[in-house]
Image: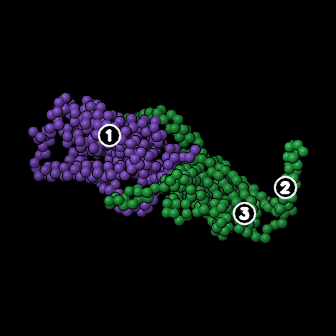
Chain colours: A purple, B green
Amino acid sequence: MQIYLPIADLPVNIFLILGMGLAVGFISGMFGIGGGFLMTPLLIFIGIPPAVAVASVTSHIAASSCSGAMTYWRRNAIDTSLALMLLAGGILGTAAGVWLFTFLRKVDQLDLLIGLSYVTLLTVVGGLMVNESLRAILRARGGTPVPLRRAGSHAWFLGLPLKMRFKHSRIYVSIIPVLAIGGSIGFIGAILGIGGGFLLVPMLIYFLRVPTATVIGTSMVLTLVTMASATIMHAATNHLVDAVLALILMVGGTIGAQFGTRAGQKLSPERLRFMLGLLVLAVGLRFAYDLVIQPVDPYSVRLLETAP
Amino acid sequence: MSPVHVSLARGLVMLALAALMLPQEAAAERLITSLSNHRVSVSSNFVGDEVVLFGSVELDKGATPRQQPYDLVVTVIGPRNNERTRRKQRVLGIWMNVDSRAFIDVPSYLVSLSNRPVAAIADELTRRRLQLGVENTMLPQKIGPDVADVVRDDPFRKAFIRLKTERDLYLEIPNGVTFFTPTLFRATIPLPANAPIGTYEIDAELFNEGKPIARGNSALEVIKVGFEQYVATAAVNDGILYGLLTSLMALVTGWLASIVFRRD
């Protein structure tokens, strides 16, 4: 069944979009990520203008992280004080990211920079995750229990001043690295148009040693707030948010996320990290492939602006 | 003579001249066209449409009929845009856009329909002068401070036409015009699903023995209606409210899903 999108100005198959929403929603619920780094390329691939895709996906991520956050909230798996502290840093980072984005657009090499950032970010993060989780899995197989918190393994930055106790996550750390993590996620998210959950979750685990019980729920709260505000910003400045496209994605995404959340809880954290790492790495390599392999058509056409 | 008289006399002379020229003009035909639909509505189930142009060639009274059959070229031009064609090249192992050309005020949609290939209808000079066929339509590029069309085998121009053709927006249909009788014709204008919103100008040019003898103009409109139009207008006019509502919709959808699928 075809439906015409009012902002993207083209008809799409409603079931194709719904299916994409379901699939990405499942993945996002499973790993506690927004899934923007999967959804946006998929939409561009089926012909949605990139700017509309980026702007509309933000509201889709907001919806799926909202439903995910609700589920985790009922399971009491959200560290509210940690989430608020991350948000404080996130807002500052987003503002800085939007500023840089505007600057780079003037320079006119934004596309390439986004492509290169995606490749670097995704392959490095994916590679690290696969490597780490594989070793954890092997350790578990070998019989040695996985030491979640090794004595004396606290990084130096956790001991910085302004220490704060995050009771729910049972950590006592300086708020400086917390703000820095929130800030960098907001910054990267604003430039690349992603929620940043796939970065935030490993950062919280590796740097702050947030236990797996609270890490996904907490990261979802941050994604929810940043993406909801990004939707409003995109709608107010570029008028590129397609509400019809967003609604179809949301319905698919939230349903998928519910099943994903359940599937995710059946898997061991190491296995989950390994699978997410593989996924992130695969998307990164896909971007790298596009940059390195000779394109079928070296030419492309882009609309500048409608003549009066 | 006063100036009034001079102009009066001049007017009379011109009238007489016009009257003298009339018999020659009378040998010409008039082109009468009509569209099946002047307004194409884009609603949520729009998947493309077709508009049919009907018409007939009216021979003026006393004019002698032509020996050769008529030819007709219909050119449909959609709303004009500025577009950029970019070319990728390998730099340090990475394919990046290294060169680009801005196409200024070019048709977003360009379809040329004719009863036989335009090359067979008129000679090259006429084709270029009247901009018949996609190849011969002016596609001005920004070159330094100037805006001008370039040679037809310019790689950027060729790439632009090719990419537009791939999206069904630039088409040349050499059998798009059908003559039922020597003077009665029909042309079917295809509007793809991605047809741009706006006014489309339709220009019909009648030929005989390679010479343009009459022309007719018409226009059609592609507009969004109902819900599609409402959403599109709201997005532009009330951006912040639109964004707030979309965010709210996201939150409600998420919340509903977590309620509906609640198991614990």
Residues flagged by tags 2 and 1 on a common chain? no
Residue nearest the observer in this picture, A85 or B207: B207
Q: Which mark is residue B212?
A: 3
Residue nearest the observer in this picture, B180 or B59: B59
Task: Residue type at mark 1: give it.
Answer: Phe
Identity of the residue drawn at 69% across and 58% down: B204
Q: Of discs 3 and 2, which sits in the foreground?
A: 2
The subunit carrying tag 2 is B
Secondary-structure class at tag 3: strand
Identity of the residue drawn at 20% across and 49% down: A133
Secondary-structure class at tag 2: helix
Instruction: Give the position of the C terminus of chain B as an image quadrant.
Output: top left
Q: Is residue A262 visible?
A: no
- The residue tagged 1 is A187
Task: Residue type at mark 2: give it.
Answer: Ala
Task: Answer left or right for B7 relative to B128.
Answer: right
Q: Earlier in the sequence, mark 3 or mark 2?
A: 2
Identity of the residue drawn at 75% across and 66% down: B182
User: Relative to B218, does residue B118 appear above or below in the rendering?
Assistant: below
The subunit carrying tag 3 is B
Q: Of discs 3 and 1, which sits in the foreground?
A: 3
Question: Splitting the image into 4 quarters, where does residue A194 fall?
Answer: top left
Residue nearest the observer in this picture, A89 or B153: B153
Measured as percent of width and height from the top left, residue B133 is found at 62, 62
* Alpha-carbon span between mark 3 and mark 1: 62 Å
- The residue tagged 2 is B18
Question: Splitting the image into 4 quarters, where does residue B65 fall?
Answer: bottom right
User: Relative to B23, does residue A242 appear above or below in the rendering?
Assistant: above
Task: Answer left or right for A49 relative to A142.
Answer: right
The subunit carrying tag 1 is A
Secondary-structure class at tag 1: helix
